[in-house]
Image: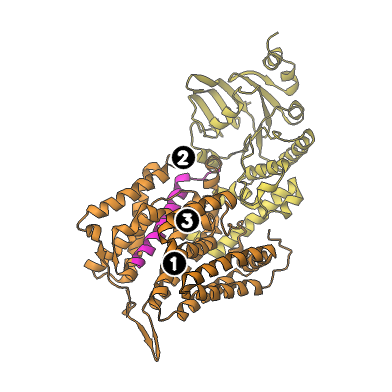
Chain colours: A yellow, B orange
Amino acid sequence: MHNPLLSISNLGKTFGGVTALADLNLYVPRNRILGLIGPNGSGKTTFFNVVTGIYQATSGKVVFESEDITNFSPQKVYRAGVARTFQRSRLLLPLSILDNIILGDHSQLENGLFFNLFRRRALAAQCRQLLDKSKELITIFDPDLADRIFEPVVNLPMISRRRIEICRALISNPKLLLLDEPSAGMTHEETHRLIDDILHIKEKIEDLTIIIIEHEMSVMERITDRCAVLNFGQKICEGTYQQVASDPEVQQAYLGVD
Amino acid sequence: MPEPSKKPSSFIPSAAAVLCGAVYMVFFLSGESQMMVFGLLVGAVLGLAAFKYWRILDAIGQSARDHQGAFSIAVVVAVVAVSLYFYDDPFVLFLLGTVLVNVLTCLGLNIQFGFVGVMNFAGASFFGVGCYTAAVLTGHTAVPHLLVILMGGLMAALLGFVILIPVLKTRGHYAALVTIAFALLFKTFLEVNDTLGGPQGLKAAGLNLFGWDVGQDIAIGSFEGSFYLGYIAVILLLVVLGFIMARRMEDSWVGLNMDAVRLDETVSACFGQSIPRWKITAFTIGNFYCGVAGAFYAMMLGYIAPTNFTFGDSLILLSIVILGGLGSMWGTVVATGIVIIIPEKFQVLQEYRFLLFSALVIAILLFRPQGLLPRPLRSYRTLKSLLGKS
């Protein structure tokens, strides 16, 4: 595993007296899908939040593409090429599908005030371009959503929202995609449809590494190349899904000590 | 929802609505007796309810959205027509001028509150900064008056910038608290400051643009109009400019970024946005609007005093924004008309206007939180002519 895309060494995060992450070491190779498993409160989402800069790490290092991004601001982490989705889908509900997707491409937008107010023709060209790009992307997931791209997100069912959220993360062509429980709030069948989409996307985009948090074990079995298991902020096991699932310590973490 | 395939509606309903509005305004503004004004008010409410019931309002809204440019021009023409109808009535013209000044101010507050979500409880104070800048500059210097108006805006923007910086790192409504403090401080500061006239206030010179003394009555041939017509022409131009800029901002990445910051700061940060940048931008631009309106108002009124810039006035301005609809520029225009004109024409209400407006705001928040004219979804319509057919 030389030159991993993301390497985490001795990462720690405490909230007052509570240890959310302790001495975590993780290496994520390029173009793979890594699963993160663990009971509730085991530190999975905290891990995402530390990597993306929402929380500051208490100790340890996060190295992404040979660059130390530990305690970078969320803005800088995004610019380095990391995009994410949220556990409770966090779309901007009153805005349209288009706006939500475009937002993910913030670094490509001309954000200057003068440009936006006075160079309307250039703005329109950029708008046109992003409209096409967003439509193309959302069509991969659901062509119907491409036709409704000017409608507000608030009326859409959960699976559509998740798809839009993934598009928002993908439109900036990130190198690393963090998916935080994409199945939350969806039926079993919807979840598997979404997983089909993700696998499909993974085939289309060459350079994309994914870390996924998920409780649905059938999802993990289908999608991941490797899995890591967290418990009380520590990694207790890592390997392929089969290896992890048969590990006695993992079973203990989930089912409790006999 | 605008369907791309649907045929655009006719322009007739919205044109008719503007015409009706103009005629109604003429009757309302020339209404002498309280009974007549009251009757017209009740009539308007009943008429609107009936229109809503017969779905005429929806048709008007659709038509106005489909013909935005033409509709906007029609509204401007209507304002000009109403002003010309009252060409020799200074009271009504001054009232119309005041409405337009407040529209400009509230557009600014709407950029702050409606776009980026910063509540400004010191709208009247930033307006006052513009007023005092104009009074001092016209009283002591020979700066051209167009520049004075600009300076009024810049002073207000600068002051807002300075007081907002310390609270930018905080989340939630700390910025609102700071503006409250500023509003109270500002009025007290003016009252005890003798250089700025203390409680008596200051005189401001009348507006003079490139040798045109706007404060002179207008006489063209046999036509003799009140000098307020000139002021209305100038402020109308400023309002149109401000409105166009606000709409352009809304239909652009700036508007999108501001919406994102308002709705979810964490998500915005995760997608690379600088939260302080957009808060400062919106707050500064909004205060610039307030300052420009203030500088103009000082010159129209001729004198200013601290009593014009109380916390209560700021609250009225904010209630206009809420009443019209957060982020809705047309809503602001309509709501300003309602809030400024009704108490002025309906003298019985004058004393109770704070009570009335508080009740109105509570009612709006309870029954129609999106405001009288809810903000439409961003569809990049102002770009559409540039975008071509989609």
Quadrant where the image shows the N terminus of chain B: bottom right
Q: Disc 2 designates what residue?
A: B171
Indicate which disc residue B10 carries. none
Q: Is residue B155 above or below residue B56?
A: above
Residue at point 33% right, 49% down? Answer: B184
The amino acid marked with disc number 3 is Leu
Indicate which disc residue B356 carries. 3
Q: Residue furthest left?
A: B194
Q: Is residue B360 above or below residue B204?
A: above
Q: Secondary structure at mark 1?
A: helix
- Residue stretch rendered in magenta on the structure: B271-297
Quadrant where the image shows the C terminus of chain B: bottom right
Residue at point 37% right, 52% down? Answer: B311
Indicate the chain on which mark 2 is placed. B
Q: Disc 1 designates what residue?
A: B99
The CA span between labels 3 and 1 is: 18 Å
Q: Earlier in the sequence, mark 2 or mark 1?
A: 1
Q: Residue furthest bottom?
A: B221
Same chain? Circles 2 and 1:
yes
